[in-house]
Image (cartoon, rainbow, N blue to C red):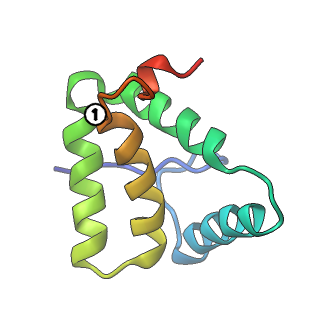
Amino acid sequence: MTMNNIVSDGTKDVTPSSIRSMTNLLVEMEKIGIDAEPFFILAAREFENIYRESAEENAHYLYVSAINENDTDNIYIWRKIYHYISDNSQNSLRNIH
């Protein structure tokens, strides 16, 4: 499966430093008390909008790939996004407004 990462400038490539900056930003937000969860909720919703029925499978693939590559930045991001997409509880993505 080939998946493209789209960055804010519209390109379909993410440099390792770009990924690290996003992870660092999210971690720093949490450290100073800013809740980063809305970012993950929006990211999960958009991922579902793009990949529809295969969103959960694709998110899981990206999460597992990050684990296999020992890529801590992507593990952090994809674990949270996968959690929201795969959660079927009453607090799931479908019930967050």
Q: Residues within 10 Å of mark 1 (few under 14, many from 20)?
A: many
Residue at the extreme bottom of the image, as rendered = 70
User: How many numbered badges does the structure rendering display?
Assistant: 1
Residue at the extreme front of the image, as rendered = 90
The image position of residue 1, as x and y in percent, is 16, 50
Residue pictured at 46% horizontal, 36% vertical: 44
The image position of residue 37, as x and y in percent, is 61, 45
Residue 32 lies in quadrant: bottom right
Nearer to me, 2 or 26: 26
**In this view, 27 is above or below 6:** below
Judge left or right: residue 62 versus residue 40.
left
Judge left or right: residue 14 versus residue 25.
left
Residue corresponding to mark 1: 55
- Tag 1: residue type? Ala
Residue pictured at 25% horizontal, 37% vertical: 56
The image position of residue 19, as x and y in percent, is 55, 68
**In this view, 79 is above or below 45:** below
The image position of residue 60, as x and y in percent, is 24, 50
Label 1 secondary element: helix
Nearer to me, 88 or 6: 88
Residue pictured at 38% horizontal, 57% vertical: 79
**In this view, 79 is above or below 66:** above
Residue pictured at 27% horizontal, 79% vertical: 69
Quadrant where the C terminus is found in the figure: top right
